[in-house]
Image (cartoon, helix red, strand yellow):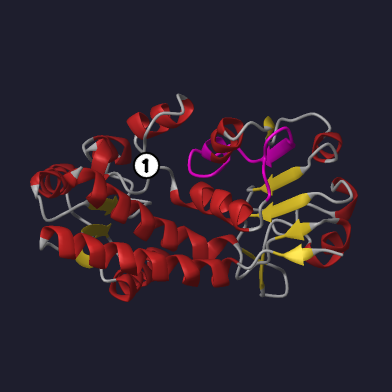
Amino acid sequence: MFKTIDGKKLAQIMRGEIRNKVEAFKHETGKEIGLAVVLVGENPASQIYVRNKIKACEEVGIKSYAYYLPQETSQNQIEELVLGLAADEAIHGILVQLPLPAHIDSEKVLKIIPREKDVDGFSAENIGNLCLNSQCLVACTPYGIMKMLESENISPKGKHAVVVGRSNIVGKPIAMLLLNADATVTVCHSKTADLKAQCLQADILVAAVGKPRFITADMVKPGAVVIDVGMNRGDDGKLCGDVDFDNVKDKCSYITPVPGGVGPMTITMLMYNTCLAAERSIH
């Protein structure tokens, strides 16, 4: 019998805890915790994400500073803004919504966000520290996955974890987190030979490929824990993950649904990271 890991429910519990931390910070310092969100251009998906992030800030009591810049904003203009936010003591976290317009060098922009305010966990320094298992801010989606495993007392220690996908945002950092938690980790990607054979070895299988229902029941070991990071539209127009949920669920011990699984945890972990960054700024 499988159990679904309810990301929505866990996110709500964590947001309550974050709200308490925000209050405690305010009580201790007399200051608010501040998150700056920078959006360039008119990308509709990005606008929705930014709206959701601002809403989440309101919910937990974090003060949000939103900067909406026109599509034609120059590299210099966005860099100047980010440098200003980096120097501003009222701002504890800086988030530049990706993707940026094609004429802007995203890497250069991300590079000037100070490591301690990089609440997205995307900077080379934070990723490097994650590899070294040192103090850092961890990318929100992978961090959320670890919290979901923790909530069900699923220890990666000694388990074989297989991560399908090697993006800098999910695949690589979740592989590192699982490795740091003493799992044996295999990372698979589009050039992997015999993907099915690799997946069948997984005690913990993380699917982060961005292809609807890509992981099928014949790729899943009986009793495996299946974490679905995907967010796709199927041919029927409905939201679905990278895992063929209906057919896979009966083979596994735990599975995350889409929607309502990993998704709600991502923005919650952004709030968590912002709180962490603020606390570290005073200790």
Q: Is residue 172 magenta?
A: yes
Q: At which x and y percent is residue 8?
A: 55, 71
User: Is residue 111 found left or right of 80 in the rendered image?
Assistant: right
Residue displayed at 48% across by 72% down: 12
The quarter of the picture where residue 30 lies is: bottom left
Task: Name the residue tied to disc 1.
Answer: 137
Residue 83 in the image: above or below residue 257: above
Residue displayed at 69% across by 36% down: 190
User: Is residue 115 found left or right of 214 in the rendered image?
Assistant: left
Q: Quadrant of the N terminus?
A: bottom right
Q: Quadrant of the C terminus?
A: top left
Residue 40 in the image: above or below residue 107: below
Residue displayed at 79% across by 61% down: 244
User: Is residue 145 found left or right of 244 in the rendered image?
Assistant: left
The quarter of the picture where residue 237 lies is: bottom right
- Does residue 69 appear in this view? no
Q: At which x and y percent is residue 51?
A: 34, 72
The quarter of the picture where residue 261 lies is: bottom right
Residue 18 in the image: above or below residue 158: below
Question: Along the line of sight, which residue is nearer the eye, 35 or 2?
Answer: 2
What's the amino acid at mark 1? Leu
Magenta segment range?
A: 154-173
Residue displayed at 47% across by 27% down: 131
Q: In terms of secondary structure, where does tag 1 sit?
A: loop
- Characterize the magenta stretch by its predominant secondary structure: loop
Q: Is residue 155 magenta?
A: yes
Q: At which x and y percent is residue 267?
A: 42, 62
